[in-house]
Amino acid sequence: MWDSYKRVVLSVFAVGVGLWLQAGMANCATFHASPFGSNTPPYDTYAKAAHKVADAVLAASGYGDTVLVHTGSYNFDTTIIPVGVTWAGVGRDSVVLNWSDTQNRFGILANLSGNNEIYGLEFSYPLGSSFNEAVDGLWSFASTTLNVHDCRFLQLKVSIAGSGPLEVSNNEFLHGQTSGLKPGEGSAWIHHNSFWGTTNGEGGMCLYAGQVLIEHNVFQNDATGGRPCAVRIYHADSVTIRNNVIVNSGEPVSWFYASGSVENNTIIDAIGVPYGLPPYNNITVILRSYETVAFRNNAFLDLEVPFEFGPESPACCDTTGLITFVHNAFWPPRDSFFTTCCAGQYSWRVKFRDSANLNLFPMFTIDSSFQLQLGSPLIDAGDPAVNDLDSSRSDIGRWGGPHGSTYPYPDLPPAAPESLTYDYAFPHVTLWWRANHETDLDHYSLHRGNSPAFIPAIGNQINMTWGSDTTYTDSLQDSLAGAYYKVVAVDAIANNSAPSNEVAVIPTGVFDTDEPAARIPRSPRLVGNYPNPFNNSTVFTVTIPAVGASPAPVQIIIIDALGRQVTVAYQGSLGFGTHQIPWDGCDSLGHPLASGVYFAELKFWSLTINQSVKVVIVR
């Protein structure tokens, strides 16, 4: 259906161009704007370019005319772009159009009259405010074709209220409190754009829209400062969301009152707040009785709160349309990620088909492409009725399905083992670490060195463990000799991972197992925190062994999902034993951190002991 729609859009656009040419071929002209022109009407050469973009636009009044904006930064008041005029810049990295009314947060930078093509421009709200409310970079109530491509919108949105076909492609949207893009009542094809949300806005807001196709976009949000939504649907004829990647959204998809499908997307790090008003779950779907939505072939990774499916209240289950959720993959396992208001005799209207949903580690590449590695269990694991471009069964995730892409699956080594730690009671050193999840993992290689920062090699390999075995006990021959350990993961074709963190075993020469010290782990450890998730406060548990100088300097470092240190939850000295360390969930300035996923690290002296202790704040 959507391939036909694409042809219709292109055909309509071609017909429109033909009509422009027939209407005024002899009068078509290009009008220039540049700060280096002579500002001489009619601005029909670069040398005579207008200093104000609005003056060049006023000179372009006929079908087929073009306004060409050259390199520079321009202050811009509300301007009407005439019917049939193309508005072009020499590149969105070179041409900046600033909304000049800094005293009024409401307004329209450019009003498109219809049959317009816009490209190569940056539209900017100069204050950089994420609270710009209702300022539109582009606005239109036209019932004719509009094409917006290769532009950048900084804190300004594109709002289309008309019923004409709309194509939006290859643009960059930095949206904050408001939406990045609001298509109109007509058909919309939204593809190959990038959206970056920073507070509570939506990348795409389909409000009383027509037929909408959203594909091959990247929604890369920063949910640490709010709950940005990737796509919000509220009344539309039909919507298809496919082959997109959505990262770090408070709510990846909010779906109210439309039929359609969500398929072959990759959705990562969704940190919504459960049962908020409006709902801020990971995925929310509310339908009327005659509407249907199918979720299939999607990959979900690191979701923090449940999905919600069903009607607006448990009392009206008979009014919800059919929701199917099949052939999707989750990691970690998603057993607790569904809630539904619908029960009783109408519960059949919400179908999860657990046997067709998978709990599998996806084995994505480590870059932002999220391609599948060779050996990924998501390869050929989608709906058997859907094929990839190579006619094999659909892969799960953004690259799969008939509208995805083919690529050689990269053969990468496993990830480095995490959270290596130990217990020590002479002569035994017991090591354990967090398990890797790659399906092609073959074994772990254990290495022991005599000095810090040693490099794992064949000469210092002490043993191997196989399969899911993530523990090993080594024996030291000298009760006073120190030892250093690392672990390497090895896959089925002998690709070696980077080494794990290093642990140091520094004996004291006293090994009386009747002493209390024997009941404390023989390495410093950040055990975790409780409660987790938490709202206003939590308590970390830290154990300190009776080795070395005491008390010892200790820090609990908090980092965000992007790896940035946001605060030091504790800094002080701790002696031997188990300690309870409270934390108020605030940053280094005493401000409460936003809802989201953070990670705690324990530093003992200058050595980082733990990795990836996940801390979840829910405000």
Image (cartoon, rainbow, N blue to C red):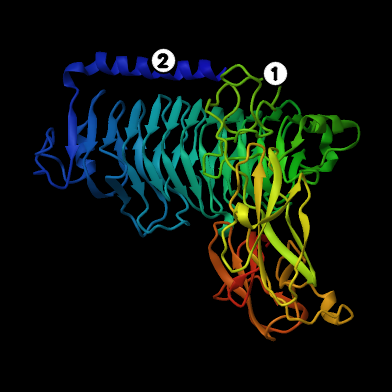
**Residue count near mark 2 (Cα–Cα under 10 Å), binned few <14, some 14–19, many ≥20:** few
User: Which amino acid, by three-letter code, is at mark 1?
Assistant: Ala
Q: Residue 525: where, in percent of width, then height?
A: 72, 70
323 on left or right of 27:
right
Q: Quadrant of the N terminus?
A: top right
Q: Residue 470: where, in percent of width, then height?
A: 76, 53
User: Which amino acid, by three-letter code, is at mark 2?
Assistant: Ser
29 on left or right of 357:
left
Q: Are marks 1 and 2 in contact (CB under 8 Å)?
A: no
Q: Which residue has dot 1 on it?
A: 385
Question: Looking at the image, is 403 positioned above or below residue 268?
Answer: above
For marks 1 and 2, give the CA distance.
Answer: 31 Å
Identity of the residue drawn at 55% across and 28% down = 212
SS at mark 2 in the image: helix
Identity of the residue drawn at 77% across and 38% down = 310
Give whichever of 20, 510 is nearer the camera.
510
Q: Residue 614: where, in percent of width, then height?
A: 68, 60
SS at mark 1 in the image: loop
Q: Residue 553: where, in percent of width, then height?
A: 63, 82
Snapshot quadrant of residue 286: top right
Snapshot quadrant of residue 519: bottom right
* Residue 11 marker: 2
